[in-house]
Image (cartoon, rainbow, N blue to C red):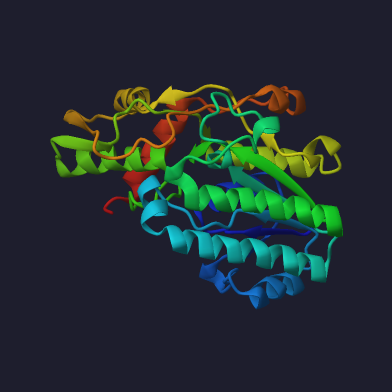
Amino acid sequence: MNIVLLGSTGFVGRNVAEELTKNGFSFFPVSRQNGYDLRKIEDNFKFLQESNTDIIINCAAHVGSLNYVSEFAADVVESNSRMILNLYEAVQKYNPQINIIQPIANCAYPANALVYKEEEFWNGPLHPSVLSYGSTRRMLLTVAESYHMQHKIRSINLITPNMYGPFDSTDPNKAHALNALISKFVKAIKTGQEQVEIWGTGIAVREWLYASDFGRIVVEVLKDLSNTEYDRPFNIAQENGLSVKELINLILQNIDYKGTVWYNSNMPDGAPRKVMSKAKFEKIFPQFQFTSFEEGIKTTAAYYQSVYPY
């Protein structure tokens, strides 16, 4: 089993890397930090030739906060589109027997869904706030399924909620939402800040996934790679959403911030609700235990404390 990990130095990639290492899986790391620009087709052929891989874990993406994917919408679309098309073209030409395992963010679901169900993935437009990145996640699934139809390339598409955990950016405009919140409060404690601004009203409901849990699921997939249940996209889901205000309360229970919180309602909330059906996930992984919010928030806060100042 020769594994390549794309985006190995990014937020999700680093969490997956830790779980692979813990479970005895070696891997070939690919990122811009070690000389591979996946927006260039030649760099895709380069890692394929150097690694002789039969499994690609694709965690490479150009993404940021809700504000970032609007502010840099064209860049997000361009770079992600190039990476997706280059990867599948290179795999098809080099070795179409390669298995590709990849997360697909749930912002690709229709904006008006109350509970995100896999069979309703295409049943409506995206929320306008995630048009750029969400469109590329739909593109990723479209390309994956199209290359399977024509070239028999197998992709295992894991639809994920908002992720959080260690190793994300310290820039609030680039960090994933919950990480950005935690890092703000850590910084506020360190600097004696009396008030923390939170974008939006705080009423938006989100489901969350601790990034190490995603890594653990990837490991489970690798251990049972021939399982045909993986051949259709499925949610990594607990069907349990919390509002931003509820999350803030959890953060405050786990870190020692004494100041006040200001919800800036002039900033966008995004989609009002993102909660995912867990039916298929529980059928495939009936024994899987997710990390509790309390444990995940404590670990993430400890990470941001360890990398301060930022």
- Residue located farthest toward the bottom when viewing the structure as drawn: 42
Using the image as rendered, state which of residue 7 and residue 28 is in the foreground: 7
Residue positioned 64% across, 61% down in the render: 84
**Relative vertical location of residue 244 with respect to residue 310 in this rendering, above or below:** above
Residue positioned 59% across, 38% down in the render: 160
**Relative vertical location of residue 66 with respect to residue 55 in this rendering, above or below:** above
Quadrant of the snapshot with the N terminus: bottom right
Visible residue check, residue 12: no
In percent of width and height, residue 76 lies at: 48, 59
Number of on-image labels: 0
Using the image as rendered, state which of residue 115 and residue 310 is in the foreground: 115
Q: Using the rendered view, name the quadrant where residue 45 is placed.
A: bottom right
In percent of width and height, residue 169 lies at: 40, 52
Q: Using the rendered view, name the quadrant where residue 83 is placed.
A: bottom right
In percent of width and height, residue 179 lies at: 39, 41
Quadrant of the snapshot with the C terminus: bottom left
Visible residue check, residue 184: yes
Residue positioned 76% across, 28% down in the render: 284
**Relative vertical location of residue 159 with respect to residue 33 in this rendering, above or below:** above
Residue 273 vs residue 137: left or right? left
Residue 42 vs residue 92: left or right? left
